[in-house]
Image: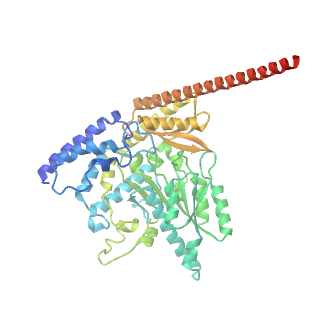
Amino acid sequence: MDTEEFVEFAKKTIDFVADYNKNLASRDVLPSVEPGYLSKLLPEEAPYRAEKWQEVLKDVEQYIMPGVTHWNSPHFHAYYPTGNSYPALVGEILSSAFGCIGFSWITSPACTELEVITTNWLGKMLGLPSEFLNCSDRPGGGVIQGSASEATFLCLLAAKDYTIRQMKKLHPEMDENLIKSKLVAYTSNQSNSSVEKAGILGSVLMRLLPVDDKHSLRGETLRKVIEEDLEKGLIPFYTITTLGTTNLCGFDNLEEIGPVCKQYNIWLHIDAAYAGAAFVCPEYRYLMSGVEYADSFNMNAHKWLLVNFDASILWVKDSRRLIEAFSVNRVYLPPDKEGSIPDYRHWQIPLGRRFRSLKLWFVIRIYGVEGLQKHIRHSIKLAHLFEKHVKSDTRFEIIKASMGLVCFRIKGDDSLTQELLDRLQARKQIYVTAGSYQNKLLVRFVVCSNFCQEVDISFAWNEITSQTTEILQERLSERSINIIIKSTDEIATRIKTLNLETKDNSQKIS
């Protein structure tokens, strides 16, 4: 493909993307295909001769689109948002075009230095302590990871390495494998599944602790378990708190947990993958009170901050702990400007890294702090509107409403809510997911798409209420039929009894 063809292909693709976004609301949010559908449509072998790009682009609509779940649809209300915006898309195009693999400064100085600048910008926008910034006089800083899962795992490994080093200093005679076998980490039972997975991958015990009635992990709960583990000879080393849990968007109590971790010299990591974006708005920063106790803080710009996947930002107070844990040098990987600029290959699990800061830079500049605040507030406003709808209908009860999430259920047996979830998924008009609280099934409704408006909230509410009405009417009809059948059976039994009594009396008279 030459440059002329590329320009034509790219222009047509941009038109395709623009039309796709413009008509997203008219598409079913969920696909209507069965597993293996695509293998029945595409050839078993790759084409031997080159094909025209026009045919390839046509096949995207014909074969790929039927199997796409439309995450950016205004009717997508499942999981949490997936960031997307035109500035981010353009930044991604440039990143792909440059193709640099920025594992060290010299491999592309702009790749490293723009990441330093943008993570500093964003850290300041969120109100993080200066210790987390590259511009502070301490060894802190930000780095873009692929996901919150990676950030949690990365910090677990760094905390593990740091703890082993400290234990060996205090007890040189201790066997390293023995130390590893005694390590224990803590999180709440509401944390994301990736936290528990980090414990599995890191080969350490991960305790899932109960939360209070506000869905928050408390300091005394953590302290009690730590003290019990210390008595057993275990070594507490890592605590993961969550700001905006997946299930109910709960917030752990950092002001209580922080001092406990400090007392016992335990690495405190904050997973703010979803809710962290809201801290660009000063009115929500009270939810991260106690952040100054943390050793690391993570949020996903690719969730709620209009940056497309993958762009998960991790800030650490002491990058030296990452470097000590992950630094492996080779003659073909000489240190670059060591000490003056981050060598990001030591701040992550893989060696290579993409120029992800470009899309973050584009989004921050083109929206501005004001535009990003407006986006967050708009999403929360729509969630409040949906919450009002739910409260206005006595057939439902709200379990939790937080940020852009509303968790609710049909009053009564779980089977009613389960049937609602099943029907909504089968109809494919809106997409919601299930959650649970205190053994009750619930519906998680999240304002996800940046295209979502009040009309889309009304559309979703009409879809939910119409299906609920049908479910309850059918249940009422079934109940009425069962009552009639039961009454008929009782009458028949009574008649039979009377007939037997009459026959018996007749025999006695005879």
Q: Is residue 75 visible?
A: yes
Where is residue 132 shown, x and y percent of the image?
45, 59
Q: Nearest the camera: 365 or 357?
A: 357
Q: Is residue 342 visible?
A: no
Question: Residue 387 vs residue 85: left or right?
Answer: right
Q: Nearest the camera: 230 or 132?
A: 230
Quadrant where the N terminus sits is bottom left
Q: Nearest the camera: 496 or 302?
A: 496
Determine whether 168 is above or below 477 in the image.
Answer: below
The total of numbered circles placed on residues is 0
Where is residue 398 shown, x and y percent of the image?
57, 35
> Residue at point 46% right, 69% down?
321
Quadrant where the C terminus sits is top right
Determine whether 480 is above or below 36 in the image.
Answer: above
Question: Residue 412 vs residue 31: left or right?
Answer: right
Q: Nearest the camera: 216 or 489?
A: 489
> Residue at point 52% right, 67% down?
203
> Residue at point 45% right, 34% down?
382
Q: Quadrant of residue 256?
A: bottom right
Residue with the most extreme right position:
509
Question: Residue 429 vs residue 442: left or right?
Answer: left
> Residue at point 43% right, 66% down?
319
Where is residue 442 shown, x and y percent of the image?
55, 40
